Image (spheres, rainbow, N blue to C red):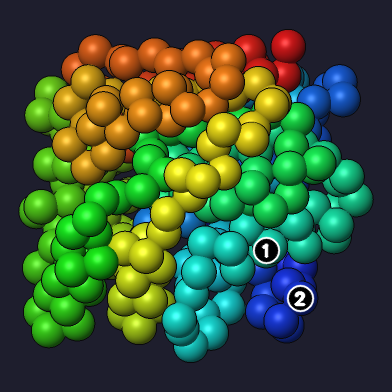
């Protein structure tokens, strides 16, 4: 996986955002939003599986990867507006917007704030709300990272991200994700954790009228299937699939299945 071939756009507050645009045949356009503490390379295998289906825009969210890391606090609304600014930069009036985990929350916020620009919504391993205890739980994770370093979280994260069999069979994929995780800026990571603890996108869901594909792993205990079920129950016409044996990073574990869901949205 590589950040090669990326360009920069400037968000409305002046933050520089690193992005990569992969052209495709046809008129389909897809924006992909990565998980917490990952970067645009999170989508490399999915983009490869989408080859020729649509043009695909991946980017490093603010605070991540090669994008600027301004001081917090951050909000999902701010991250959502960054997508609007990126789409303006590349000349896309509308697109399918899809995200995994944090990226799903940001996609929901984008769909709520910029609904006229959404052709379809892909929600993978994600939720509209992490629950009553979310602010405290996310603050605790950020505090541990601050006090002990990100390396103290790696063991916990690897078992959340990937199933046991996948970790054993695909050490290179696991180590790539760990490497991206460890390269994070600590203040930006902490600010993003606080953002997710505060996020509540539930009020937007009943107003969505575009096609929506929801995917979650049966073994995802970061955003379990009941959270995906809530999304499906509250977004009119949404289609949901629980993927047997998959954990939290489905775009890395089963990129072909995530690409298939996106192709359904393009179709």
- Dot 1 or dot 2: first in sequence order is 2
Q: Residue at x 55, y 70 (%)?
A: 62
x 22%, y 55%: residue: 132
Determine whether 165 is above or below 92 in the image.
above
Pointer 1 with pointer 2, Cβ within 8 A: no
Name the residue nearer the viewer: 190 or 198: 198
What residue is drawn where x is 79% and y is 52%?
87
Q: Position of residue 111 (x, y in %)?
A: 65, 44
**227 sits to left or right of 155:** right
Is 229 or 45 nearer to us in this picture? 229
Mark 1 residue crowding within 10 angstroms, few (<14) / some (14–19) / many (20+): many
The image shows residue 203, relative to residue 13, as above or below, that is above
Q: Position of residue 226 (x, y in %)?
A: 26, 27
Viewer-side residue, 233 vs 32: 233
Tag shown at residue 12: 2
Position of residue 145 relative to residue 99, above or below, is below
State the SS at label 2.
loop
Q: Residue at x 58, y 78 (%)?
A: 68
Question: For residue 155, which numbered disc appears in the image?
Answer: none
Q: On the picture, is 72 further left or further right than 27?
A: left
Specify the quadrant of the image occupied by residue 240: top left
Q: Dividing the picture into quarters, in which one does residue 48 lie?
A: top right
Q: Is residue 227 above or below residue 11?
A: above
**Kind of element beneath mark 1:** helix
Q: Position of residue 258 (x, y in %)?
A: 48, 23
Where, quadrant-wise, is the C terminus in this rendering?
top right
Residue 240 appears in the rendering: yes
Q: Which mark is residue 82?
A: 1
């Amino acid at each position: 996986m590589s950040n090669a071939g990326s360009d920069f756009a400037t968000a409305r507050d002046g933050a520089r955002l690193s992005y990569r645009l992969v052209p495709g045949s046809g008129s389909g356009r897809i924006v992909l939003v990565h998980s917490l503490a990952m970067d645009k390379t999170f989508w490399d295998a999915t983009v490869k599986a989408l080859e020729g289906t649509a043009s695909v825009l991946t980017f490093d969210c603010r605070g991540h990867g090669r994008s600027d890391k301004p001081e917090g606090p951050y909000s999902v609304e701010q991250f959502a507006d960054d997508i609007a600014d990126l789409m303006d930069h590349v000349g896309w009036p509308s697109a399918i917007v899809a995200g995994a985990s944090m990226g799903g929350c940001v996609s929901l916020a984008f769909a709520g704030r910029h609904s006229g620009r959404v052709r379809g919504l892909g929600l993978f391993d994600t939720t509209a709300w992490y629950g009553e205890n979310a602010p405290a739980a996310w603050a605790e994770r950020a505090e541990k990272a601050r006090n002990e370093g990100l390396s103290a979280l790696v063991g916990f994260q690897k078992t959340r991200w990937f199933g046991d069999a996948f970790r054993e069979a695909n050490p290179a994929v696991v180590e790539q994700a760990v490497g991206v995780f460890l390269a994070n800026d600590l203040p930006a990571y902490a600010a993003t954790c606080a953002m997710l603890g505060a996020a509540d996108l539930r009020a937007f869901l009943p107003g969505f009228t575009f096609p929506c594909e929801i995917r979650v792993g049966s073994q995802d205990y970061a955003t379990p299937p009941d959270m995906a079920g809530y999304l499906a129950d509250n977004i009119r016409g949404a289609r949901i699939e629980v993927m047997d044996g998959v954990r939290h990073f489905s775009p890395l574990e089963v990129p072909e299945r995530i690409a298939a869901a996106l192709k359904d949205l393009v179709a």
